[in-house]
Amino acid sequence: MKKVLYICIPVSLACVTASVTKAEDATVTYKSLTLDVALDAARAAIDQCRTDGFQVAVAVLDRFGQTQVLLRDRYAGLPAERTATDKAWTAIGFRNDTSALAKSIKNGSLDPGLASLPRVTMMAGALKIEMGDTLLGAIGVSGASGGDKDEKCARVGLDAIRDRLDF
């Protein structure tokens, strides 16, 4: 009987360990912005645009392109919400700030046909939100008089949360 136990216990432990290892290999863990952090970034961006005299929409999307926060100032133009969201979606999809993407199309290093894909918005105004090398999402702004002004507001939003991200 003791011999059976000496064999069964190690075999059982090996099976349990193997199944735990397989379960760990079958899943991934990822980091995501909390709602409070995403909201703080959006508020800081919209406040900066207000200070600069612009009524805008601000979208913060998670790493999967899903909207976490969407704020629209009272007099922001009709396309502002969708454009801010699509700018952020583009930054996530290409893992690059949209001003850099727009420059790449202009100088010919990126195929201009990409800009005709659905939702792809190659206009300045969206920045990646990263923690080290990990993409957490993006913030997009639309409604100021020019993408550079949208991007300025997005940068203020990103800077407002930078110290709360683990670098």
Image (spheres, rainbow, N blue to C red):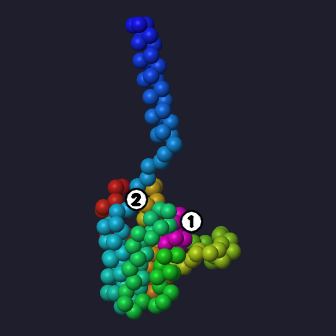
The residue to which callout 1 is attached is 94
For residue 32, which numbered disc appears in the image?
A: 2
Find the magenta span and give its range: 88-99
128 up-or-down from 78: above or below: above
Residue found 47% across the figure and 19% down from its top = 11
- Residue 48 sits inside the magenta stretch: no
Please tell me which residue lies in front, 87 or 22.
22
Q: Is residue 18 left or right of residue 36?
A: right
Mark yes or no: residue 109 visible: yes
What whole-number distance in Å separates the C-alpha atoms at marks 2 and 1?
A: 18 Å
Mark yes or no: residue 151 visible: no
Please tell me which residue lies in front, 6 or 149.
6
Residue found 47% across the figure and 67% down from its top = 66
Residue found 41% across the figure and 12% down from its top = 5
Instruction: Sort mark 2 into few (<14), some (14-19) or many (20+) by Cα contacts within 10 Å.
Output: some
Please tell me which residue lies in front, 1 or 120.
1
95 up-or-down from 153: above or below: above
Secondary structure mostly seen in the magenta stretch:
helix
- Amino acid type at circle 2 is Ser
